[in-house]
Image: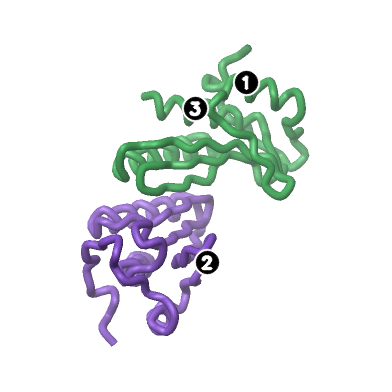
Chain colours: A purple, B green
Amino acid sequence: MEQLSELQCEACRADAPRIDGDAAAGMMSTLPEWQLLDVEGINQLHRVYKFRNFKLAWAFADRVAELAEAEGHHPSILLEWGSCSVTWWTHKIRGLHKNDFICAAKTDLLFED
Amino acid sequence: MEQLSELQCEACRADAPRIDGDAAAGMMSTLPEWQLLDVEGINQLHRVYKFRNFKLAWAFADRVAELAEAEGHHPSILLEWGSCSVTWWTHKIRGLHKNDFICAAKTDLLFED
């Protein structure tokens, strides 16, 4: 399978196909630390990253924000003492686009760096 | 009334008094944009700040994180496209300490700057 983290987000139209069912399950298998959430009928990708203090969590949140700007796709980023939670989904299609899986994979690379 | 935004957070002990009831209502009157939330029995101060784009929201989130480090007191900061939501409470006393009202007032100053 292609490496998600090596892909770029593409422009997303409102009629772009959602990724769900078997396709979503297949991609989730490459993102073992991520949870697939259903938030009021909208599928989202969610992961909590843990850190030893606030500063490390904050530095990570900043790297995720940089990634968001670079990809032109923006997650929700929850920064708290010792943790940073990241949630990707695509507002325009009210669910998951391939972009979200790409960005989740890239977020993991920021953590491993 | 003293200006909350001119005070510094003090060290908080687990047996520090919570601020609730009339005392909380009095302080809330000086923080008109803030909501008092009850999250599973824990009172929290919450405000959503709106911005024209992601970069402005991100810059504000960074200022709030700087404030948190300066005060030694850390809120949850939710950064999304066009908004930054800030929630203050004190884990150690499972509720609101005077520090939380001080920090809410100081967060407002960061927005007005």
**Viewer-nearest of labels 3 and 1?**
1
Would you say the residues marked 3 and 1 are in contact, meaning their CB atoms lie under 8 Å apart? no
Q: How far apart are the alpha carbons under marks 1 and 2?
A: 37 Å
Q: For the point 35% across and 67% down, which residue is it? A: A100
**Residue highlighted by disc 3:** B106
Is there any visible trace of residue B8 in the rendered image?
yes
The Cα–Cα distance between marks 3 and 1, rounded to whole angstroms, is 15 Å
- A35 horizontally vs A17: left or right: right
Q: Callout 3: few (<14), some (14-19), or many (20+) C-alpha neighbours within 10 Å?
A: some
Q: Position of residue B57 (x, y in %)?
A: 36, 41
Instruction: Please state, as top left, top right, bottom left or bottom right, where the N terminus of chain A lies in the image.
Output: bottom left
Chain under callout 3 = B
To which residue does mark 1 refer?
B29
Q: Given the current orientation, which residue lies at the most extreme top position?
A: B1
Q: Exactly how many numbered labels are in the figure? A: 3
- Label 2 chain ID: A
- Give how far across and how far down residue A34 sits, in percent: 46, 72
Identify the amino acid type marked 3.
Answer: Lys
Q: Which disc number belongs to residue A38?
A: 2
In the rendering, at what x and y percent does residue B54 appear?
Answer: 32, 45
